[in-house]
Amino acid sequence: MTIKDVTNQLEELAPLSYAEDFDNVGLLVGQYNKEVTGILVTLDTLEAVVDEAVQKQCNLIVSFHPIIFRGLKKLRGDTYVERVILKAIKNNIAIYSMHTALDNVREGVNGKICEVLGLKNKSILIPKKGVIRKLVTYVPESHTDSLLEALFDAGAGNIGNYSNCSFRSAGQGSFTPGPSARPAVGKPGIPQLENEIRLDLTFSSDRQNEVLQALFSHHPYEEVAYELYTLNNAHQLLGMGMLGELEKPLETAKFLELLKKRMNVSVIRHSKLLSETVRKVAVLGGSGAFAIGPALAAGADILVTSDLKYHDFFTAEGKIVLADIGHYETEQFTKNLLVDYLRKKIPNFAISLSETKTNPINYF
């Protein structure tokens, strides 16, 4: 099994096209065609993690956070980032990062937090825009159904809980084949009018290659007329953060006690506790100040996140409780999620959960 075989499985869970534009995801160190001897899953890639990979004979590290985030201009070992990369290269260890690609899927970071907290009726807090594509093409009436079936099989036409969605409109296409053309209908040099069906279908950006391949493989025309658009519609099943509901409402203080226990934290920084009970909970793993507005708009009673600054707490406006439990703490179960996923996808293979503590923050 090669590194590419493993990353293909990971990208079924979290396609890299779902990552935010500022992010740096994918294979950061190494080559896709290398054979895998073992996989080590971690939240952060530090020198100690590379040492652990060497000890466990793992030559692929699957890391949530990218070790290379901003551009590197040198590799001398002056910083921890440079030292990690040098050590990984020296020991022939590849490093693959998922980061915001995994943040944006329902079964990712925030879905795991909801699972740990026992939340029900889950939905995306901030649906992602720019990941829905629209295909328009024109096909002879006689080939409409066969082409649609191929496009559906490739992943087009899925909208929320609905599949095989399309729009058809009838019209006439006109064309004149050139002297060297081999037209499916008509003859070279003679203008042709053909009864055609215009097809409109949407699909998620990660399926674009498969959808286009199906279009070209199953369309009868020598030259396929088609149009691709990126829609600004929000994808309701992808995005940052999640909303969920507790089975039964809890007083705010009792929910914070539950939060400490389930998330294994000793300290919670929070805004003023409100007298109302907590039922609807918003969660966003990692730095989540930007989710305060959406959580308020969604009617959440509390937002569980991290890295809130002093002035962020004022934006609660006495309408929502903000609970900052720590960056590492919100994402700590992500590596367990990935190990469980990989062991199901690649059974009977050496997949290890890193035992190295990577949280740089300590509490006294």
Image (spheres, rainbow, N blue to C red):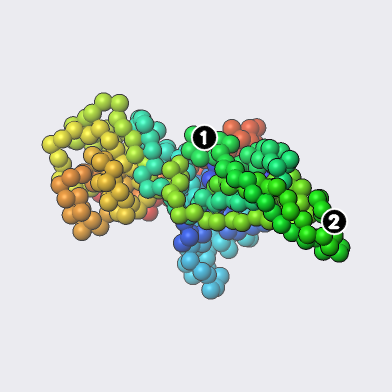
* Pointer 1 residue: 162
- Judging depth in this view, the residue of 222 and 247 nearest the camera is 222
Q: Residue furthest right?
A: 180
> Splitting the image into 4 quarters, where does residue 118 fall?
top left
Quick check: 246 left or right of 359?
left
Q: Which secondary structure, mark 1?
A: loop
Count of picture labels:
2
Asked if 262 appears above or below 7 in the picture, the reply is above
Q: Position of residue 173 (x, y in %)?
A: 69, 54
- Judging depth in this view, the residue of 55 and 235 nearest the camera is 235
Residue visible at 36% across and 44% down in the picture: 125
The numbered dot on residue 53 is none
Residue visible at 34% across and 35% down in the picture: 244
Res 209 visible: no
Report the amino acid beneath label 1: Tyr
Res 107 visible: yes
Report the amino acid beneath label 2: Lys
Quick check: 58 left or right of 275?
right
Q: Residue furthest bottom?
A: 73
The CA distance from mark 1 to mark 2 is: 41 Å
The numbered dot on residue 187 is 2
